[in-house]
């Protein structure tokens, strides 16, 4: 097996085992593990490092943690909330998660890359950013998997039962939204079908109504007795009552089919 494929499969398995997320675009996961130093290698064919994904993941992580502590600690003031958030999102805390998962071993980097708290924390944040992009910017889905990713650190600082209940709540929101979206799709599909049926009925009624107008205009009592020559010779008269030659051709074709 090619070395690149082997490591990519290990990355996918690692992420799935840890947070139960399967990437639809594996290239995003590869980018999330690509350190900036890897782009400087002579034989490197990589075009982009994890920096953009890390930027996005950092913002999402901050939002997820803020929302978490705001809901779990209703009695905390602004200062207490800020302190708790800082404890959960600092590089040292994230690097512990990264180290336990063994992410640095799967990172694409220069052999001389210095491994520190910042690098390991960046990998966590870039994975979060990659999930956000891969899920087509589905925040609720990304929030749930982010909580799973950081749960070991959170559980040390937050009451387990409170955290577990919150994670289950986030999970239920994903399922509810999925069901709602499916119901909306079914409803929209039914509405489209109803519109088609309505339009067909209206078109049929319009044709019948217009046939009556033509017959009255030509003083013909039976539609079957319409002479094609007479119909076209009377086109000027018909135009005066609001019909054009294209519509007349439609009527003629219909009468030919009936015969």
Image: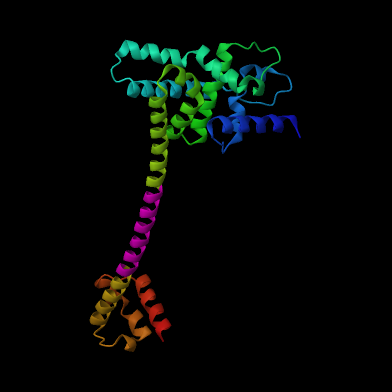
Please report the residue visible at 37 percent of the width from the left and 70 percent of the height from the top: 246
Please report the residue visible at 29 percent of the width from the left and 72 percent of the height from the top: 205
**Left or right: 219 with respect to 168?**
left
**Left or right: 92 with respect to 163?**
right
Q: How is the image coloured?
A: rainbow
The range drawn in magenta is: 182-202
Q: Splitting the image into 4 quarters, where does residue 8 fall?
A: top right
Q: Position of residue 53 (x, y in %)?
A: 53, 25
Can you say whether 243 is above or below 53 in the image?
below
Q: Position of residue 137 (x, y in %)?
A: 45, 33
Tell me if I can see residue 52 in this picture: no
Residue 199 in the magenta stretch? The answer is: yes
Q: Main secondary structure of the magenta part?
A: helix
Q: Position of residue 52 (x, y in %)?
A: 53, 23
Q: Quadrant of the N terminus?
A: top right
Can you say whether 124 is above or below 77 in the image?
below
Q: Quadrant of the C terminus?
A: bottom left
Q: Position of residue 109 (x, y in %)?
A: 66, 19
Q: Residue furthest right?
A: 1
Please report the residue visible at 62 percent of the width from the left and 33 percent of the height from the top: 13
Q: Splitting the image into 4 quarters, where does residue 98 fall?
A: top right
Please report the residue visible at 40 percent of the width from the left and 23 percent of the height from the top: 63
Tell me if I can see residue 176 in this picture: yes
Residue 95 in the magenta stretch? The answer is: no
* Relative depth, front residue between 188 and 3: 3
Can you say whether 70 is above or below 16 in the image?
above
**Left or right: 221 with respect to 37?**
left
Number of marks in the rendered image: 0
């Amino acid at each position: 097996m090619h070395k690149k494929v082997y490591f990519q499969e290990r990355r996918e398995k690692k992420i799935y085992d840890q947070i139960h997320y399967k990437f639809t675009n594996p290239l995003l996961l590869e980018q999330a593990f690509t350190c900036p130093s890897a782009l400087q290698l002579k034989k490197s064919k990589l075009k982009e490092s994890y920096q953009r994904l890390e930027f996005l993941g950092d913002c999402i992580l901050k939002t997820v943690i803020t929302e978490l502590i705001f809901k779990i600690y209703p009695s905390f003031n602004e200062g207490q909330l800020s302190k708790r958030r800082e404890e959960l999102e600092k590089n040292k805390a994230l690097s512990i998660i990264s180290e336990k998962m063994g992410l640095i071993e799967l990172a694409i980097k220069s052999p001389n890359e210095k491994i520190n708290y910042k690098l390991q924390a960046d990998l966590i944040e870039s994975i979060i950013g990659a999930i956000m992009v891969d899920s087509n910017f589905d925040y609720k889905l990304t929030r749930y998997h982010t909580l799973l990713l950081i749960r070991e650190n959170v559980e040390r600082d937050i009451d387990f039962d409170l955290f577990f209940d919150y994670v289950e709540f986030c999970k239920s929101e994903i399922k509810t939204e999925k069901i709602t979206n499916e119901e909306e799709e079914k409803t929209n599909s039914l509405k489209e079908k109803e519109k088609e049926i309505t339009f067909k009925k209206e078109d049929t009624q319009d044709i019948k109504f217009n046939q009556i107008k033509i017959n009255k205009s030509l003083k013909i009592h039976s539609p079957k007795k319409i002479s094609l020559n007479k119909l076209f010779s009377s086109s000027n008269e018909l135009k005066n009552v609001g019909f054009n030659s294209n519509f007349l051709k439609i009527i003629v074709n219909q009468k030919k089919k009936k015969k």
